[in-house]
């Protein structure tokens, strides 16, 4: 956690969820409507097909809805893509950019991720910019070097704590049940904070830095209690309302 920073618990549904899964959105929207909503933000990023209905289902709730990717252009001949404006038009308020699955499946570069984040800002969306090292990069001791390069390349010069969230997701921890040690997470997050403050000044002291990669109800409290970890980006465990809410609920103790 970071002083004066409102944590964000975010779920990334990836390519999962048909209309039948809207029940889970409803349950999450109801579940996050307690007193904790005064202290902690909750966000679900469903597939694009569910965006519009998901925002309608959560209008009266503290739950926020986001998309998983956007195109860098405002409109045009880009078959299959979504613009940031279209996402905002669905009343969504966040968009994930540069997830490692986009970087690997679609060869997205830091340069492109930066352009997508800028497109998000132009549409008044908050960008969740994902970075993280692969297993090989970690083995060869390059973790911090990779984080430095990805932060420098993917985060726009105009970023600030309101428009930007960083998500540190070690690629090898995604969907594997593996997580870095508390010490490793602490070191990585302290490093990212220092890099951001060096570039953006004191304003970056309150920029949220999430941890993602095999966050579950059983490890949430430990991971989110680490210094400079300002919430979680959750994949698999966010698909089930009860698991997502259990992770969100870890903040009952952490913020007490
Ligand atoms: P898991 O929580 O399934 O490991 O996924 C993490 C992730 O990639 C969230 O964006």
Image: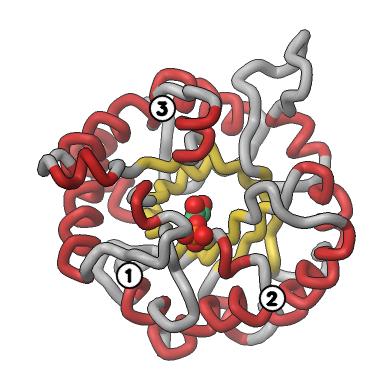
Could you tell me which quadrant the C terminus lies in?
bottom left
> Which one is in front, 139 or 44?
139
Mark 3: which secondary structure? loop
Q: Mark 3 or 2 closer to N-term?
A: 3
| Mark 3 crowd level (few <14, some 14–19, many ≥20, 10 Å Cα) | some
Residue 75 point in image, percent of width and height: 75, 15
- How far apart are the alpha carbons under marks 3 and 2? 33 Å
Q: Give me the residue at 31% from left, 32% from top.
A: 150
Residue 114 point in image, percent of width and height: 45, 25
Report the colour scheme: secondary structure
* Disc 2: which residue: 241
Asked if residue 57 lies left or right of residue 234, the reply is right
* Disc 1: which residue: 1
Label for residue 156? 3
Mark 2: which secondary structure? helix
Q: Give me the residue at 15% from left, 46% from top.
A: 139
> Which one is in front, 247 or 16?
16
Q: Residue furthest left?
A: 141
């Amino acid at each position: 956690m970071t002083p004066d920073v409102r944590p964000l618990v975010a779920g990334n549904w990836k390519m999962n969820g048909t209309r039948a899964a809207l029940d889970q959105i409803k349950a999450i929207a109801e579940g996050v409507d307690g007193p904790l909503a005064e202290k902690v933000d909750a966000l679900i990023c469903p597939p694009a097909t569910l965006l519009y209905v998901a925002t309608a289902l959560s209008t009266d709730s503290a739950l926020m809805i986001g998309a998983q990717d956007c195109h860098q252009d405002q409109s045009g001949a880009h078959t299959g893509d979504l613009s940031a404006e279209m996402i905002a038009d669905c009343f969504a308020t966040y968009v994930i950019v540069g997830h490692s699955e986009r970087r690997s499946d679609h060869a997205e570069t830091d340069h492109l991720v930066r352009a997508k984040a800028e497109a998000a800002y132009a549409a008044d969306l908050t960008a969740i910019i994902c970075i993280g090292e692969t297993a090989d990069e970690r083995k060869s001791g390059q973790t911090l070097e990779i984080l430095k390069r990805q932060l420098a390349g993917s985060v726009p010069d105009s970023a600030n704590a309101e428009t930007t969230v960083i998500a540190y997701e070690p690629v090898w921890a995604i969907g594997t049940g593996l997580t870095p040690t508390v010490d490793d997470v602490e070191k990585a997050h302290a490093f990212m904070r220092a890099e951001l403050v060096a570039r953006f000044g004191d304003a970056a002291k309150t920029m949220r830095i999430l941890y993602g990669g095999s966050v579950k109800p059983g490890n949430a409290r430990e991971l989110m209690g680490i210094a400079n970890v300002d919430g979680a980006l959750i994949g698999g465990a966010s698909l089930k309302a009860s698991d997502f809410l259990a992770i969100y609920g870890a903040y009952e103790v952490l913020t007490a």
